[in-house]
């Protein structure tokens, strides 16, 4: 700032040109940030699609892995991913929402609750490989589930549970207290208040958190390597019996082979995985729009 | 604040057609919509030496009030004098505030609502509440009204109940073709009438209103006031208001509260609204109703 000029009356120095310039610079930085992000994504997508699309075919989707790239398919991995997603979702959904409701609506405010909250946030930051080790010790060995898809799904549930709990808690916390009071004032018990006022209002936010977490689970590889996901499965997986694979593992396996053709079918598999994630996100949008039809804060 | 003060309430009250002399505040002293003298009505709610504490802080001190059936009782007083606390004590809403406790007795039809075997959840069905800011649920209009009845195990026809409640809340004609739309899509005044419909759907004995018009425009305010006059034929209403004109326009009895040196709210004077506004016995009341403080 320049020093005030000597004058009898207080004056302003609008410096409009300078202020506008600053605004323009800031705008430029923001545009560059989003541009760079989109450009990176675009380069990746173009690369994957140009290499992968020629290999996409019905046979590729319905076939099983093979040593010969032109015969290789990813059905076992696709089915494995779908089963894994379903089981993970079924396990995570009630546990995550239940824990979030407890922490937001039932838990007494106190040291224990705040320690719990903090530690759940910390758990969300633990590397996924640690969950893999834990899953190996707990589900595979202690609970004797073996190297099965079920053990993998339970491990992934543990992995995304903190994220689901945190996002659900935030969705619940965003509901104004006036909604709770409205329900109580009509003679609602606490559960009726949660069921009637909290869940419908927080539903869209909770759902978004869960689907984003599911997307993360579906793309995970590291913990599953420890939980027995194998790279060459030529049959469809059974949740309780050994030998399964999922798309990211299959992709990882193909990419690590030296032949160019395997690199290309890896790209094709990435397209399939991206499509699955895209469908999941689209589903989230539709459900969210439907659930929030009546919500207008 | 509310602009309604400048609007004459003559629309509703034929009795107030002729402007009374003196103060700008008009009081409907008699007329077809004015119930019998408060003293003649039976007592529904009785507060006996009631005090409310937030932890060690006493927010309300030794309040004794009788609320009469089919009357509108207004609680007035400066900000922070404990009006809302007192109101929220009557339906045990303040039980939800950690550390809040009461002393004294609160009788509803002779039963002590703070008695040992009384469940606050059951109390709140019998003593309904309408809040300062309209707070409809993010559900359809129909669901908004039916919710309270459902959770309380209503045995009758819900469609019929929803229609009856909306009619009583003077909202039916505006929403009958869009019961499936969101309650939150309505205007502020309509939302508040929806909240009133929701409250009367559980058939409470008393309706508490905590500054129900403070978030509304003058026109909606008048509609709510008119509605209150209608509702008191069947219900007993207690309203907290910052708007003295509103208290004067709608209430039968007025309770004036203020706070003492210890910041605890207490009742200075109570009685028929006409008396409180035209002939207050206490200097504090006179200063407040004439606008000298508060």
Image: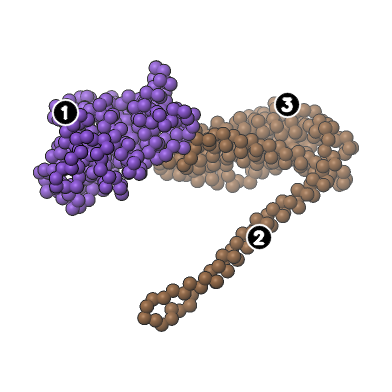
Chain colours: A brown, B purple
**Location of residue B203 by image quarter:** top left
- Which residue was labeled with disc 2? A32
Disc 1: host chain: B
Q: Position of residue B67 (x, y in %)?
A: 20, 31
Determine the secondary structure under disc 2. Answer: helix
Residue drawn at (36%, 26%), measured in percent from left and top?
B167
Residue B36: image tag: 1
- Of callouts 3 and 2, the N-terminal one: 2
State the CA–CA distance, disc 3 to disc 2. Answer: 48 Å
Q: Are marks 2 and 1 in contact (CB under 8 Å)?
A: no
Q: Position of residue B199 (x, y in %)?
A: 35, 29
* Number of other residues with Cα within 10 Å of mark 3, as a class: few under 14, some 14 to 19, many 20 or more: some
- Which residue was labeled with disc 3? A238
State the CA–CA distance, disc 1 to disc 3. Answer: 79 Å
* Vertical comparison of A127 with A135: above or below: below
Q: Position of residue A116 (x, y in %)?
A: 49, 42
Q: Is residue A173 left or right of residue B251?
A: right
Disc 3: host chain: A
* Number of other residues with Cα within 10 Å of mark 2, as a class: few under 14, some 14 to 19, many 20 or more: few
Q: Nearer the viewer, mark 3 or mark 2?
A: 2
């Amino acid at each position: 700032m320049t020093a005030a000029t000597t004058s009898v009356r207080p004056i302003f120095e609008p410096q409009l040109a300078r202020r506008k310039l600053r605004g323009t610079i800031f705008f430029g930085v923001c545009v560059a940030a989003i541009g760079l992000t989109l450009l990176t994504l675009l380069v990746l997508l173009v690369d994957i699609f140009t290499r992968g699309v020629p290999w996409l075919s019905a046979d590729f989707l319905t076939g099983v892995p093979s040593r010969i790239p032109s015969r290789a398919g990813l059905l076992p991995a696709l089915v494995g991913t779908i089963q894994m997603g379903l089981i993970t979702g079924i396990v995570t959904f009630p546990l995550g929402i239940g824990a979030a409701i407890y922490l937001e609506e039932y838990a007494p405010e106190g040291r224990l609750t705040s320690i719990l909250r903090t530690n759940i946030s910390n758990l969300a930051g633990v590397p996924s490989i640690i969950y893999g080790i834990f899953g190996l010790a707990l589900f595979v060995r202690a609970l004797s589930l073996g190297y099965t898809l079920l053990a993998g799904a339970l491990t992934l549930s543990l992995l995304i549970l903190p994220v689901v709990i945190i996002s659900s808690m935030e969705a619940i916390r965003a509901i104004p207290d006036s909604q709770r009071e409205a329900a109580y004032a009509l003679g609602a018990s606490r559960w009726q208040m949660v069921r009637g006022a909290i869940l419908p209002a927080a539903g869209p936010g909770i759902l978004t958190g869960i689907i984003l977490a599911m997307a993360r689970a579906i793309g995970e590889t590291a913990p599953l390597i420890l939980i027995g996901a194998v790279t060459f499965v030529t049959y469809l997986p059974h949740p309780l019996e050994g030998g399964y694979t999922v798309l990211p593992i299959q992709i990882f396996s193909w990419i690590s082979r030296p032949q160019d053709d395997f690199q290309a079918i890896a790209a094709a598999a990435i397209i399939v995985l991206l499509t699955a994630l895209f469908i999941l996100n689209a589903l989230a949008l539709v459900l969210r729009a439907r659930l929030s039809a009546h919500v207008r804060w | 604040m509310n602009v309604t003060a400048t609007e004459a309430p003559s629309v509703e009250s034929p009795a107030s057609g002729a402007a009374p002399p003196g103060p700008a505040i008009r009081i409907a002293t008699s007329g077809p919509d004015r119930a019998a003298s408060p003293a003649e009505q039976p007592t529904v709610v009785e507060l006996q030496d009631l005090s409310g504490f937030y932890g060690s802080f006493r927010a309300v001190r030794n309040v004794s009030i009788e609320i009469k059936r089919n009357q509108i009782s207004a609680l007035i007083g400066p900000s922070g004098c404990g009006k809302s606390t007192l109101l929220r004590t009557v339906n045990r809403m303040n039980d939800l505030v950690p550390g809040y406790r009461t002393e004294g007795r609160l009788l509803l039809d002779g039963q002590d609502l703070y008695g040992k075997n009384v469940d606050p959840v059951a109390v709140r069905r019998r003593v309904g509440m309408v809040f300062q800011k309209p707070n409809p649920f993010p559900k359809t209009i129909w669901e908004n009204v039916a919710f309270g009845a459902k959770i309380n195990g209503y045995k009758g026809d819900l469609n019929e109940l929803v229609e009856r409640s909306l009619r009583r809340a003077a909202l039916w004609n505006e929403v009958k073709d869009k019961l499936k739309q969101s309650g939150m899509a309505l205007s502020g005044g309509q939302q508040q009438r929806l909240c009133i419909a929701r409250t009367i759907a559980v058939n409470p004995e008393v309706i508490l209103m905590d500054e129900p018009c403070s978030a509304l425009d003058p026109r909606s305010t008048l509609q709510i006031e008119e509605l209150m006059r209608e509702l008191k034929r069947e219900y007993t209403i207690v309203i907290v208001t910052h708007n003295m004109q509103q208290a004067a326009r709608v209430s039968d009895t007025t309770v004036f509260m203020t706070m003492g040196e210890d910041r605890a709210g207490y009742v200075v004077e109570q009685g028929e609204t006409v008396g409180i506004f035209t002939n207050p016995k206490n200097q504090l009341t006179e200063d407040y109703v004439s606008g000298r403080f508060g």
